[in-house]
Amino acid sequence: MGFACIDIGTVTCRLALWSDDPAHLDPQEKHSTICDLGRGVDATGRLREDRVAAVVGCVRDYLVRAVAAGHTRVVCTCTSAARDAANAADLLDPLRAMGLEPQVIPGRVEGELTFMGVTCDMPGERVAVADSGGGSTEVALGRADANQTSVEWVHSFDLGCRRMADRFGLGEGPVAPATLHEAHRACEDVFAALPWVSGTTEPPARLAAVGGTVTTLVAVRDQLVPYDPSRVHLATLTLADIERLEARLSALTPDDLRNVAGLQPQRAPVILGGVVVVGSLMRAAGADELTVSEGDLLRGLAMAVRASLAGTRKEGSWRPCLKEVGVQKGCNIR
């Protein structure tokens, strides 16, 4: 018997189906839908009714898919948009009505789970892992060895592609260089708190990144149509790549952006906000390149579920809540 993980982000809602075997690091199925839950949250502090409806409909479809595949145990996490919104209950209550127990995870937990998911591919390395999402960017610093993951430092920064696009009008191109400069300065001022920048620790050997922004930038750079995760996973993005892509994308109108090869049309309004965040992070971190990973929060979440089922999850650490869903449990997911 396997289990399903659903992660509800600020921009994207994702599903992964996993086996119980801890040796299987990759999901049996993985699906991603841009629902843009966080649109307007930075300005209003509230989730929009239409965006909540989009997420609820998406999750309902995901549950039908999971149950049909025999994965009736489901864990569901919510991140930045749900953390920030005063009316998060408008989302959480319908999810509970479907039989889920949505867990709004703190930024620290989000960063730790992502670190676990990424560093499986980087054993023994001291790595900084950045999860650049729609409303926040989590950065975790540490090392993954054969039998354990050691996180030295983790922090959630209130910088994300949707937040920056809304704040600086970056989805309404062409965008003036002065606006981009102002957005970069705002990000770099915040990222100055990175511990190796402030001099409180040694810099990592590698900067890795996950999230729709960096995977999309690889797809746009390499014109991956259709998207090919095998060509994205562990690909390298240089700071020069980021700067070229920013110059190209900032010169386009919204209609032109939606026609860029490798860029999902639904992601077009937030991609430039993401480019600004990632480029600013690299400059602040002193990194000329970063490694893009497809091993992300969903993989880390699966690892946490397996550890909880096996009784090996560390005492006092955050624990995922698996719920049995399906028509047989009175859950009207259809």
Image (spheres, rainbow, N blue to C red):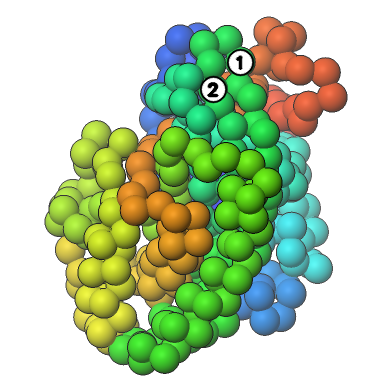
**Residue lying farthest right?**
316
- Tell me how far mark 1 sits from mark 2, CA to CA: 6 Å
Residue 145 drawn at (x, y percent): 53, 16
Compared to residue 291, the image places residue 120 above or below, namely above
Tags 1 and 2 in contact by the CB under 8 Å rule? yes
Q: Mark yes or no: residue 330 visible.
A: yes
Q: In the rendered structure, which amino acid carries the disc numbered 1?
A: Gln
Graded by Cα atoms within 10 Å as few (under 14), some (14 to 19) or many (20 or more), the crowding at tag 2 reads many
Q: Helix, strand, or loop for circle 1?
A: loop
Residue 60 on image: x %, y %: 56, 46
Q: Is residue 49 left or right of 145 when viewed as pictured? A: right
Residue 15: where, in percent of width, then height?
Answer: 49, 39
Q: Which mark, residue 35?
A: none
* The C terminus - image quarter: top right
Q: Can residue 11 be seen in this view?
A: no
* 86 shown above or below 220: below
Q: Depth check: give the residue in front, 196 or 31.
A: 196
Picture quarter with the N terminus: top right
User: Residue at image x 71%, y 44%?
Assistant: 108
Tell whether 278 sits left or right of 146: left
Residue beneath disc 2: 144
82 to the left or right of 209 = right
Q: Position of residue 168 (x, y in %)?
A: 51, 84
- In the image, taking residue 272 as reference, residue 230 lies left or right, namely left
Residue 45 sits in quarter: bottom right
Q: Which mark is residue 148?
A: 1
In the depicted structure, whether residue 176 falls above or below residue 296:
below
Q: Residue at left 68%, top 40%?
A: 153
Name which residue type carries label 2.
Ala
Q: Which residue sits at x=76%, y=17%?
A: 314
SS for dot 2? strand
The residue closer to the viewer here, 201 or 326, is 201
